[in-house]
């Protein structure tokens, strides 16, 4: 087995069309935490998706710390084979290795990746897993990226536990373009736990304010999407005033609200309840209410104006509908995005007795 020396530009070269086609079910395997000097084995499932026999001629690695066991016999069309990679874990710290497969499917190598972290002692999550998402349990079922500015790439970690009797390969499905997810380790044995890291790319969110979506936690790749597996994800993208100096801020609008919590009491015999909040501009420039959004259903809002001149006031009317609120599992709230540099985001809580 030869050492792997490949330029990064090599990865961008086109793969030629052949009767044999190689594809890995899992191109990247994350081993998670590994005990120092305890070798770890990762198994890659390789498929021949072409219509002629696939032959792996040679395997190359990027260091002597990795050994590979691969099939020497041809892999028939539409069948699979297993490649076993062993990492010796003789160095502490994070590692990321590449394995290149040279075959008759292409003149270019097919790359597999192995990563993880070698530690002296494994540190497990000590919290609870109160939420059941399909066959897996998690510590949260809602992810909130608050106060994000354009260009930020915040991350949130979800702890996941396999409480079944089968090996799990957790996967987060239906991710929009602005979300990325990585699971560590890639596989969870029965009774074991891991971490999914969700990264938000704020550059790919178009509008300021609240963006919401639902993603789904699968037990294995290709798992079916179902409401019981849903994780809700919200992100609040704010205007960025960090470059505004003290003098500039003095000349900007300044918002004052009559309340940030609206108490509406109980519905009684009514189907709806309404209340209002007064919004006053105490600054020197026009106050603009750029967005008004609801975190949940069951709320309707109306404003008599969204541009408020200095010294003037506007009225925000809030109406909640009892039947729709019954379907909501989180607290009803309103998000307001403004051009006030000190209050670009305001959350208004709605309190009502259902």
Image (spheres, rainbow, N blue to C red):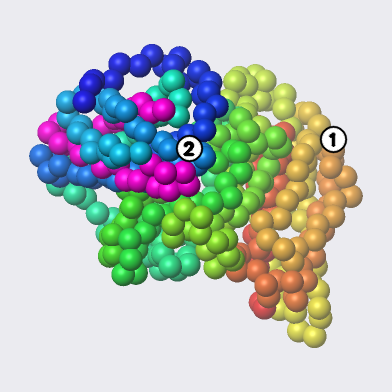
Secondary structure beneath dot 1 equals loop
Please state the horizontal and vertical placement of residue 228, each as a whole percent of the image.
54, 68
Q: Residue at 46% across / 43% down in the picture? A: 77
Q: Is residue 114 magenta?
A: no
Q: Which residues are magenta?
A: 75-104
Q: Give the residue pinned by disc 1.
A: 309
Horizontal side of 94 relative to 215 (left or right) equals left
Q: Residue furthest bottom?
A: 269
**Crowd rating for badge 1 (residues with CA inside 10 Å; few <14, some 14–19, many 20+):** some
Q: Give the residue pinned by disc 2.
A: 52
Quadrant of the drawing holding the C terminus: bottom right
Main SS type for the magenta part? strand
- Residue 352: mark in rendering: none
Please state the horizontal and vertical placement of residue 282, each as a whole percent of the image.
75, 37
Q: Residue at 71% across / 55% down in the picture? A: 294
Q: Are marks 1 and 2 in contact (CB under 8 Å)?
A: no
Cα–Cα span, label 1 and label 2: 73 Å
Secondary structure beneath dot 2 equals loop
């Amino acid at each position: 087995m030869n050492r792997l020396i490949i330029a990064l530009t090599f990865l961008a070269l086109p793969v030629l069309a052949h009767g044999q086609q190689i594809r890995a079910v899992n191109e990247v395997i994350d081993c998670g935490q590994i005990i120092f000097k305890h070798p770890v084995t990762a198994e890659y499932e390789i498929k021949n998706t072409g219509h002629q026999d696939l032959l792996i001629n040679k395997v190359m690695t990027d260091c002597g710390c990795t050994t590979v066991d691969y099939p020497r016999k041809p892999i028939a069309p539409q069948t699979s084979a297993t490649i076993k990679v062993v990492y010796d874990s003789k160095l502490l710290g994070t590692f990321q290795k590449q394995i290149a497969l040279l075959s008759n499917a292409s003149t270019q190598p097919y790359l597999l990746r192995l990563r993880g972290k070698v530690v002296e002692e494994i540190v497990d999550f000590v919290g609870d897993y109160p939420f059941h998402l399909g066959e897996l349990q998690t510590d949260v079922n809602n992810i909130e990226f608050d106060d994000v500015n354009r260009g930020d790439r915040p991350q949130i970690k979800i702890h996941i536990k396999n409480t079944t009797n089968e090996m799990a390969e957790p996967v987060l499905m239906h991710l929009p373009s602005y979300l990325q997810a990585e699971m560590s380790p890639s596989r969870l044995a029965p009774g074991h736990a891991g971490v999914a890291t969700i990264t938000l790319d704020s550059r790919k969110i178009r509008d300021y304010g609240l963006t919401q979506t639902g993603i789904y936690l699968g037990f294995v790749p290709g798992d079916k999407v179902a409401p019981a597996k849903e994780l809700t994800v919200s992100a609040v993208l704010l205007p960025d005033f960090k470059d505004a100096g003290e003098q500039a801020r003095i000349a900007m609008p300044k918002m004052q609200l009559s309340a940030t919590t609206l108490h509406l009491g109980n519905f009684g015999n009514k189907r709806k309840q309404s209340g209002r909040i007064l919004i006053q501009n105490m600054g020197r420039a026009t106050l603009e209410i750029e967005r008004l959004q609801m975190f949940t259903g069951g709320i309707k809002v109306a404003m008599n104006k969204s541009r408020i001149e200095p010294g003037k006031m506007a009225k925000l009317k809030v109406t909640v509908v009892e039947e729709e609120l019954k379907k909501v599992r989180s607290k009803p709230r309103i998000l307001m995005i403004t051009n006030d540099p000190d209050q670009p985001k305001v959350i208004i809580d709605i309190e009502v007795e259902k």
